[in-house]
Image (cartoon, rainbow, N blue to C red):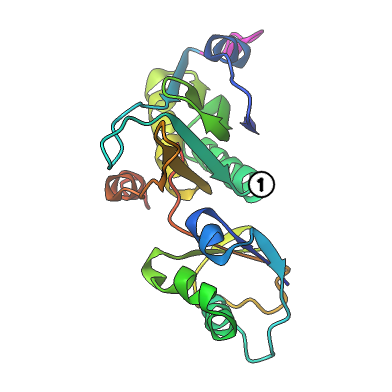
Amino acid sequence: MRVLYFAWLRERIGVAHETVSPPDYVKTAADLTDWLMSQEPRYQAAFADLAALRVAIDQEQADLDSPITGASEVAFFPPVTGG
Amino acid sequence: MAVRVQAADFDPGAELAALSAGRTDIGAVTSFTGLVRGDPTAEGAPVAVMELEHYPGMTEKQLEKIEAEAAARWPVIASTIIHRYGPLAPGDRIVFVAVASAHRAAAFEAAEFIMDYLKTKAPFWKRELNAAGDGRWVDARESDDQAAERWAR
């Protein structure tokens, strides 16, 4: 599964994207953030404020409790500021 | 219907002319052009550079979805959405939305709807830098969320 990070999440995690193989109990986007945070402290810095976290699954807007099973691309980013 | 996400500048006049070229059913063309402001940053120094990051692939999909929704809600004959990314300077054009319709009410409303949705749903992030190169990510504004919510139904 490809995971992408944008804006200050990318800066805190230190990579723009990576390929991860989470264990089977990781079923939602929130599970994925929990699992990543258990791996390394830099994820804790990025995911500390869940209210500031937005998620897209396979390039579609989603929620933290949305299922990620079978998804090929999950992206985490702060609220958007375009326009 | 056209969506373009690009680093290059665009010519609003040429875009407007292209929207209605060769047609006689369009009675109204409205447009919005957004520019980078050189406001003071939180630290006081003026913005020297505005960097725009986006999510290639999802950005285009979201803009196409917003454009399609506008066409479903109003009798849109043609529309154009252009958004730039990369480093921009104060005064630079950043975003362009134009809508053509038979009458003005639909053209005004659809263009406003597209901008309001773009601001809250298109995956772009702004980072402002002062002349010394100190950067700061721009915070999302609640007023933008409220502007988008008024179109909810």
- The residue sitting at 57% across, 29% down in the picture is B82
Q: Chain of mark 1?
A: B
- Give the farthest residue toward the front: B132
Q: Nearer the viewer, residue B7 or B134?
A: B134
The N terminus of chain B sits in image quarter: top right
Return the x and y of residue B28 as percentages of the image width and height. Answer: 46, 15
Q: Judge left or right: residue B55 versus residue B151.
A: right
Return the x and y of residue A27 as percentages of the image width and height. Answer: 61, 84
Q: Is B15 inside the magenta-drawn segment?
A: no
Dot 1 lies on which element? loop
Q: Over which residues does the magenta segment extend? A: B20-26
- Few, some or many C-alpha atoms within 10 Å of disc 1 (few <14, some 14-19, many ≥20)? few
- Circle 1: residue type: Pro
- The residue sitting at 63% across, 61% down in the picture is A15
Q: Judge left or right: residue B39 versus residue B9.
A: left
Q: Nearer the viewer, residue B149 or B26?
A: B149
Q: Is B21 inside the magenta-drawn segment?
A: yes
Whether B141 is drawn above or below B71: the answer is below
Q: How many marks?
A: 1
Whether A83 is drawn above or below A63: the answer is above
Magenta stretch: dominant SS?
loop
